[in-house]
Structure formats: structure tokens, C-alpha cells
Image (cartoon, rainbow, N blue to C red):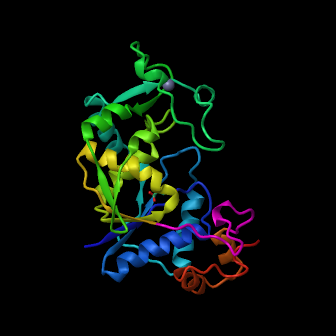
Amino acid sequence: MIVTRFAPSPTGRLHLGHAYSAILAHDFARRQGGRFLLRIEDIDGTRSRPEHVKTIIADLAWLGLSWDGDVVHQSQRLSAYAGALDRLREMGLLYRCYCTRAEIAAASLSAPHGAEPIYPGTCRVLTRQNAERPHCWRLDMARATAIAGPLTWQDHGRTIVADPLTAGDVVLARKDAPASYHLAVTVDDAWQGVTDVVRGQDLFAATHVHRLLQALLGLPTPAYHHHRLLTGPDGVRLAKRHGAPALAALREGGSNGLALATELRVGRVPIGATDT
Ligand code: GLU
Ligand code: ZN
């Protein structure tokens, strides 16, 4: 049985790009008599808002999408992430990192502008630990990849060789949250029995890390279907466009959600839907 999911973070309102992604994941499952799940990725307690969850649910219903079973909230799944973290810690693959953002930025001057800098590994070699000092937990990527060995995944039926090393020592538990995006997504996709991950090309790089975590934690690997990102008539990515309207604004303005979904299904962005 095919199982797909849509996994928005309720840190803001959904835009056309989200609608496109949700529709593709929904249709992929429905076409094959499968299940489509909704997961709210609200581990970031400082940025997630309950009112955004309500809006997301209303937006999806307006687009004509229905999901199976209960909506899963990652904020209710923290003990599962803690268990996965313990396991990796026992394998000797995690270390405490006390660095501030500014310190990391200063130590990795070569990071391209705007890109998340690759962690320079400063705390990997610290022998004295201080649990009282604010810290996150990082994955020792060199050790982890050595243990896991060569890994691949299927993307649109093509074999991709995973290269997690280039992501550096990623954060698996944050200073301000008990799990990072990478850990929570990997644990939950397995726990929910997701067979096919349909999501935007912007998350392709993250899949290298997710594939490694699956191997380390003994979890199954779904098939992936990274899709192109929607662009406006001028070729600019919608998510990057200034003033691309939220779905809620279109909905409240009286637009027809089903008609919008029909256009998005054929990859068309309706004129007028890109400007406020
Ligand atoms: N929560 C992530 C986001 O909103 C997506 C997670 C995923 O599809 O893997 O960007
Ligand atoms: Zn550090």
C-alpha cells in the first residue's frame, strides 16, 4: 500500500508552492489507492503557532484535499526522537556543541552568501564536557558515514548515491528544541509507514542526511520523488517572490480552491494568483 504525506511547518501561512507539493503527494497516493497523511512539523516551539495549524487545515480542505487518519503533531512525538538520539549517542556518534551562530559563521568564512555554513567541527575534539552549558548535539559525520558504508536511494526511479559527508556535522538535537528537522522527519516517515516521499527539490540535499540516519537507526528507506519548484510567469521561484499571496488570502478573497488545484495539477500558476 502506497503511503505519502504532506508535512508543513506551522511557522507561517501556506503559499502556492506548498499547495503544489501537497497536491502532488495527495494525488500520488490516491491514484494508486494509497493513503495520504498530514503531519504538522511543530517541534520548533518558538516559531510554531496553533493558529497556523488551523489555517493549514482550512487551506487543504479548500483545495479539495483529504487525508487519512489523525493529524500527527511532532510536538507530541518528542519521546520517540529522544529514543533515536539515545541510540545514536550509545553508538558514539553524537557530541555536544556549545558554539553560537556567530562563532560558527566566523569560523566558516567560505560559506556562500545566504547558505547555512558547514560546521567547522570545533567541538568534536573537546574532551571536557559541560552539560550545564547551553549546547546542541551534532552527528560526527565522518564516523557515521564510515559505519554506514555506501548508501543509495531511488528518486523518480533513478538511483542516487548518498553523499551526506558534504553536509558536515549536522545538528540532531537543538539548544532550543529536543530534535532537529532531520531527525524528526526520518523517525516519523518510518513510524508512519511512508513508502513514498513527494516533496520539493529544495529538500533534495536534506535527503542525503535522511538516508544516512535511516541506515544508522535501522529504518526502511522510502522512495523519493523530489519535484520541481513552481515559478511565476517570469521564471522566478514563487517562494522567493515578493508578495506571493498566502493561500489563506486567496481563500478569504473568494478564489475557488478547486479551480486553483486543477490549474496547479497541470503545473500552471493562474494569472493573478501570484500577485497581491
Ligand atoms: N516541514 C518541512 C517544510 O515545511 C517539510 C518536511 C518534508 O517534506 O520532509 O519545509
Ligand atoms: Zn561547537
Start and end of the magenta stretch? 227-245
On whether residue 235 falls in the magenta region, the answer is yes
Residue at the image position 53 percent from the left and 45 percent from the top = 45
Q: Is residue 77 visible?
A: no
Q: Is residue 56 left or right of residue 147?
A: right
Which residue is painted at 55% across and 85% down in the image? 262
Q: Is residue 201 magenta?
A: no
Residue at (58, 84) in percent of width and height: 263
Percent across and percent down for residue 224 are 37, 63
In the rendered view of the protein, which quadrant contains the N terminus?
bottom left
Q: Position of residue 191 (x, y in %)?
A: 29, 56
- Residue 103 screen position, x and y as percent: 60, 25
Q: Is residue 92 above or below residue 180?
A: above
Q: How many dots with numbers?
A: 0
Question: In the drawing, does residue 46 fall left or right of residue 178?
Answer: right
Q: Nearer the viewer, residue 117 or 56?
A: 117
The foreground one among 41 and 237 is 237
Q: Residue furthest left?
A: 218
Residue 33 location, quadrant = bottom left
In this rendering, would 243 be left or right of 258? right
**Does residue 188 show up?**
yes
Q: Quadrant of the C terminus?
A: bottom right
Main secondary structure type of the part rendered in magenta: loop
What residue is shown at x 60% (from left), y 65% (from top)?
A: 14
Q: Is residue 191 above or below residue 244?
A: above
